[in-house]
Amino acid sequence: MAPSIVILGGGFGGLHTALRLSEFPWSDGDRPNIVLVDQNPHFLFLPLLYELVTNELDDWEIAPPFSELLANTKVQFRQDTVQAIDLGQQQIALHSGETLTYDRLVLALGGETPLNIVPGAAEHALPFRSLADAQQLKDRLQILEASDKDVIRVAVVGGGPSGVELACKLADRLGSRGRIRLIERDDGLLKKSPAFNQTAAQKALDQRGVWINLDTTIQQVNAMDLVLTYKEQEDTIPIDLVLWTVGNAIAPPLKDLPVPHTPDGRIRTDVTLQVTEHPNLFALGDLADSKDAYQKPVPTTAQSAIQQADCVAWNVWASLSDRPLLPFRYTHLGEMLTLGTDTAALAGLGVTLDGPFAYLARRLIYLYRMPTLEHQLKVGLNWVFKPLLEVMRSASSNP
């Protein structure tokens, strides 16, 4: 009987694992049934989500449907959510009522933005992690832009890459009406980023007039204001919109899974990315606490997940075909930041670049990283011809 491989989560880690597994030279009798499960009908190219805020890109470009991406593979897709995982029976109960049985299980559900850390955040703050989040933000911005407010006050919580990128995009969208405030509880922005990107980001934020509050914690989020603490001094500021970009919570079905967890809930793995003490389980991406072959912690980034996917796919295949499993070796390729609608910063592999050329380089690199060649071609052609069509429309409307 053909083995069954179930992959939970269709983000970078899950989707690339599925695509890679479908390419391996399985023998006819041993070709497995591969099932990918995700609650959404589409994949999301998360690093380009910010471009939706400024209407630089369309939804279809960064969120192609799984049915399209998996069309030429043997991978089956289920749009569903996980209700329970029975490790003893090797079964997964889905909310639709379907039960999946597996020989190998890949956990790639990613994480969620926790909004229960500060009182009022769950009710009044918006996360920015999904296509629905981006659409909700755009809807809120449209309402504020259509209002009679002289200024639109937006607070972005978190001084990591997500917060910095979002603040720059919002500043460019809102222009002179925007009053963007970036709030970070540490004493600096982008503390884990290369120094070059830190400098470029600070320059971009300054040019856009973004207010930066360092060493600042949020005590309360209300409908119309924020309560902040800076060096034990409390202050209440008016606000129209709060965006939350900090924290990472593990998806509910995995919190109580009887496997080794870290104190923050992430699942521990061995260097082969097998879940510790569970050789038929693999974990990668945001939910995994992984170290590579050199015992260095693996960062929770898209590039990490893509590299982990190659290793997981190989090791799943190897474990089912009597081949040796390989330790995961992580290669840091650098960091790219979008810093508005016309500039970016790039630092990695000995190269540093900022400004419009970095903006173009980032776009081309991410185009190359699109999950399938077909989607790369569709998006690439659109990027080439869209500006030409806009020029033609402009010329025809202004004879």
Image (spheres, grey):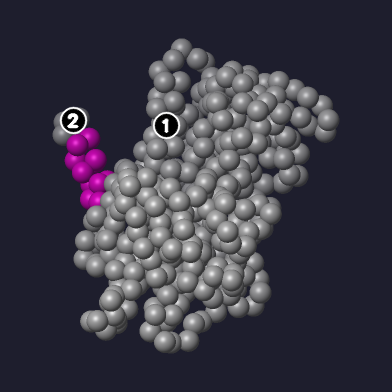
Which sits in the foreground, 280 or 343? 280
Q: Mark 1: which secondary structure?
A: helix
Residue that numbered label 2 is attached to:
397
Give the answer, above or below, for where 116 lies relative to 273: above
**Amino acid type, label 2:** Ser
The percent position of residue 285, horizontal first and vertical second, equals 51, 60
**Residue 234 visible within the image:** yes
| Residue 392 lies in the magenta stretch | yes
Q: Is residue 334 magenta?
A: no
Task: Kindly report the secondary structure that dominates the magenta region of the rendered protein.
Answer: helix
Q: Image check: 27 left or right of 55?
A: left
Q: CA distance from mark 2 to mark 1?
A: 32 Å
Furthest residue toward bottom: 323
> Regarding mark 2 in the picture, which secondary structure is present there?
helix
Query: Residue 219 at x, y = what percent?
Result: 71, 29
Q: Quadrant of residue 187?
A: top right
Residue 243 shown left or right of residue 227 in the figure: left
Q: Magenta segment range?
A: 379-394
Which residue, given by chain and number where applicable, does mark 1 sit on?
Answer: 136
Seen at 49% across and 29% down, the residue is 175
Q: Position of residue 19 (x, y in %)?
A: 33, 67
- Pointer 1: residues within 10 angstroms few (<14), some, or many (20+)? some
Q: Give the answer, above or below, for where 203 lies relative to 137.
A: below
